[in-house]
Image (cartoon, rainbow, N blue to C red):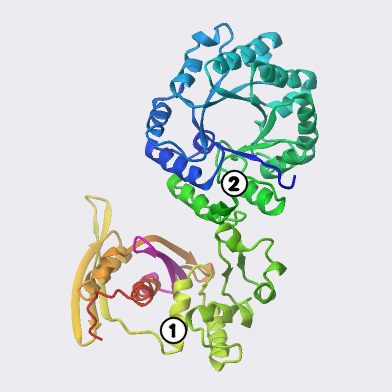
Amino acid sequence: MEDEKIQIFDSTLRDGAQGENVNFTVEDKLNIARELDRFGVDYIEAGNPGSNPKDMEFFLRAKEKPFTHARLVAFGSTRRKNVLASEDNNVRALLTADTEVVCIFGKSWDLHVTDILHATLQQNLEMIADTISYLKAQGREVMFDAEHFFDGYKANPDYALQTLRTAQEAGASAVVLCDTNGGCFPDEVEAITRAATGAVSVCVGIHCHNDAGCAVANSICAVRAGARQVQGTFIGIGERCGNTNLSTVIGDLQLKRRCRCVPQEQMVQLTKTARFIADIANIPLTAGMPFVGRSAFAHKAGMHVDGVLKNSASFEHVPPESVGNKRNVLISEVAGRTALLSRINEVAPDLTKDSPETSQLMDLLKRLEYDGYQFEAATASFELIVLRHLSRLRNFFSLENFKIIGEQSTAELRNRSSAMVKVRVGERYEITADEGEGPVHALDRALRKALEVFYPSLKDVKLIDYKVRVLDGKDATASKVRVLIESTDGEAVWRTVGVSADIINASLIALVDAIQYKLTRYDAQSDVRLD
């Protein structure tokens, strides 16, 4: 496998779009396609122009600006049973898309031929041959997706292989073995792929679904057996349990098997590309996703952190920077002195392991975590704690007092709350009120409204996530709660935390920290400073 070229065939815009809660606009598809092209995938399967006008519009607009690396692929099925390919509307729509490459799927499982198509086995072979040869005659490169190939091979190996040979003889440049039901295991896929590569001379591809959780492993085993094209979606989205996750496969094959999947210089863009696609798809990227997830290089246990800081290979199978990710040392009660020092040094590089402040911060952290704080996600609050303890935190403002008034309108059946705050900046005071959908929303709006008088850059800050966790239910409504707030200024994103038996107070702690972090970390140079 080493130094072998493995074609990467991305189907995010076609197979990925079939996933639950995934809905791309034409603009979304164009943005994702451009990003995949920049990253260096070989093929982008962008949709079925015969199935909906959105896909046809995409192909028309994509021609306005040619791709630099990837080749666009139109997707469709073999012709209908009793219609010539030249007269089949869906086949002709593939030509209208005007792509160099067309991917045709057809049946390779005899059960599907007889029970789903209600055709004879010979008729199915004729449908495959006629469709591919017609498109080939129109100047297209044609690939053949052998749908349900592995199930078909297990039921009738001779016929499944015959569909591949028929596609090859008709002019297909590649035949792709599809685990459409996603239920095969790696040993099965490897053995059957080896049989398929021995039966044809064209490129063999692999297309796996993840219903048994084996899509990535199955794809790698297929490559080991001779497949030279891997199909999938970039972050694994797709129908049911999804498709082969290409960000994982590319990382595995290129970094660990030394195959050539994308240009080597683009590997550092792997994480950026995955997160870009997740953002466009409006799908949270799983924290534990290999290579590209937020937790892929996160270390929490003291022994692990100590080891990885001494020699990263001790607990990291590849360097995080090789895929554009970064190491994340988590701060918690199970973290050791080395882990804590690593995070402290990001804020205060002058402290050492033997500094008395390090021991003091360790004790403070453990007391706070005992009280219910967690800093794994709320790294902004952790930085502020360090700065406060070291007396290095600038006092941008103080909240003198606040008042919340709750109102309920039975006519509108909505809860409206008002908040009034008094803040001090230097020797000046500002008293401001605002209202919102509930007390926390009202308090957030009133606080930022008051502080914007002094710090105009806060106009860009908004709260984008708010989570409440009851820490110990045995005290019922008197239980402590932990509030985690996520904020952004349109560029950076940061998280802060507050803990209290009063949900308003817990929220206020996190809100004040969020604003303090913005002013401290990003230090808006144009703001008026009066303290």
The magenta stretch spans residue 485: yes
The residue carrying pointer 1 sits among few (fewer than 14), some (14 to 19) or many (20 or more) residues within 10 Å by Cα, namely: some
In-image side of 515 versus 348 (left or right): left
Residue 200's x, y, as percent?
75, 24
Residue 506's x, y, as percent?
40, 73
Q: Secondary structure at mark 1?
A: helix
Residue 281's x, y, as percent?
45, 44
- At label 1, the amino acid type is Leu
Residue 479, visible in the rendered structure: no
In-image side of 140 versus 228 (left or right): left
- Looking at the image, tell me whether mark 1 or mark 2 is earlier in sequence order: 2
Helix, strand or loop: magenta stretch:
strand
**Residue segment shown in magenta:** 480-505
Quarter where residue 111 is shown: top right
| Numbered label attached to residue 262 | 2
- At label 2, the amino acid type is Val
Name the residue that disc number 1 marks. 387
Query: Which residue is pictured at 49% across the width and 36% down the height?
Result: 13
Q: Secondary structure at mark 2?
A: loop
Query: Could you tell me how far apart the alpha carbons at marks 1 and 2 are, in whole angstroms?
Result: 43 Å
Quadrant housing the N terminus: top right
The residue carrying pointer 2 sits among few (fewer than 14), some (14 to 19) or many (20 or more) residues within 10 Å by Cα, namely: some
Circles 1 and 2 in contact, beta carbons < 8 Å? no
Tally of numbered discs: 2
